[in-house]
Structure formats: structure tokens, C-alpha cells
Amino acid sequence: MRNGHNKNRNSQAAIFARLWETKEGKLPRTLARLALKTTFPPQDLDRMHLLVQKNRQGTISANELEELDSYIAAGDLLALLQSKARKTLKIKKSTVLDHG
């Protein structure tokens, strides 16, 4: 189990998230609130959906697959920041999803 913990802790997303942490390992409250409001723009959501469909159908090109991987990596970074934000603000995920 220790190796899995270290791998997650040393992932690109975890390292990036630590750039913003306070000494206590939390995000500053202002950043935490901003992270929870952050989402992909509609044109990126549409593009991701198209790439996922092409990938499922087996018609995705190498360049498109690389682009999809980039979206996935960016999504992982955002998800980790949002997780830390909820922890900082002590908010449950279901509450955040209903923020409108």
C-alpha cells in the first residue's frame, strides 16, 4: 500500500497542488473558493465529448488521442485542487455540485 500512496503523492497533479498549499497542507481559502467555481469552458467540454466518442468508436487519430490525454491530465489537476478545496472549506462534494 505504501507504494500506491507515494505514487499518488508524487503524481504531477499532487505536486502541482502542493504549489498552492499553506504550511498546514491546505489551500488558502480564497484559492479554495475559486477552485470550486472553476470548470472547463463549454467549447472544451464539447471538444472532450467529441474526442471521447471518437476514442470509443476507434476512429481517434494519434494527435486527437494526445489532445484527449491532455484534457484528462488537466481534469485530474482540477479534480485534485477541488478535492483539497473542499477539505480546506470542509464542504462535502454533493454540496459543491449543487452550487449552481
Image (cartoon, helix red, strand yellow):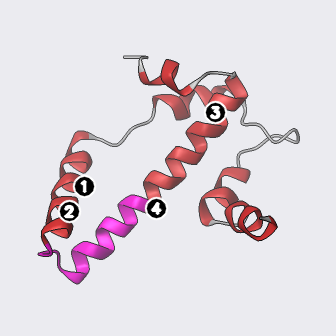
Answer above or below: position of 26 versus 51: above
Residue located at (23% from left, 40% from top): 42
Image quarter in which the C terminus is found = top left
**Alpha-carbon distance for marks 4 and 2?**
14 Å
Helix, strand or loop for disc 1: helix
Nearest the camera: 31 or 26?
A: 26
Q: Position of residue 71 (x, y in %)?
A: 36, 59
Helix, strand or loop for disc 2: helix
Q: Which mark is residue 51?
A: 2
What residue type is disc 3 on?
A: Ala
What residue type is disc 4 on?
A: Ala
Q: Position of residue 83 (x, y in %)?
A: 60, 38
Q: Which mark is residue 48?
A: 1
Q: Looking at the image, do the residues carrying marks 1 and 2 touch, with CB atoms under 8 Å apart?
A: yes
Image side of residue 11 versus residue 25, left or right:
left
The earlier-in-sequence mark between 3 and 4 is 4
Membership of 9 in magenta stretch: no
Q: Most prominent secondary structure in the magenta stretch?
A: helix
Image side of residue 1 versus residue 17, left or right:
right
Residue located at (22% from left, 73% from top): 64
Image side of residue 93 versus residue 74, left or right:
right
Membership of 69 in magenta stretch: yes
Q: Which mark is residue 85?
A: 3
Q: Looking at the image, do the residues carrying marks 3 and 1 touch, with CB atoms under 8 Å apart?
A: no
Q: Which residues are magenta?
A: 58-72
Query: Which residue corresponds to mark 4?
Result: 73
**Alpha-carbon distance for marks 3 and 4?**
18 Å
Residue located at (39% from left, 66% from top): 70
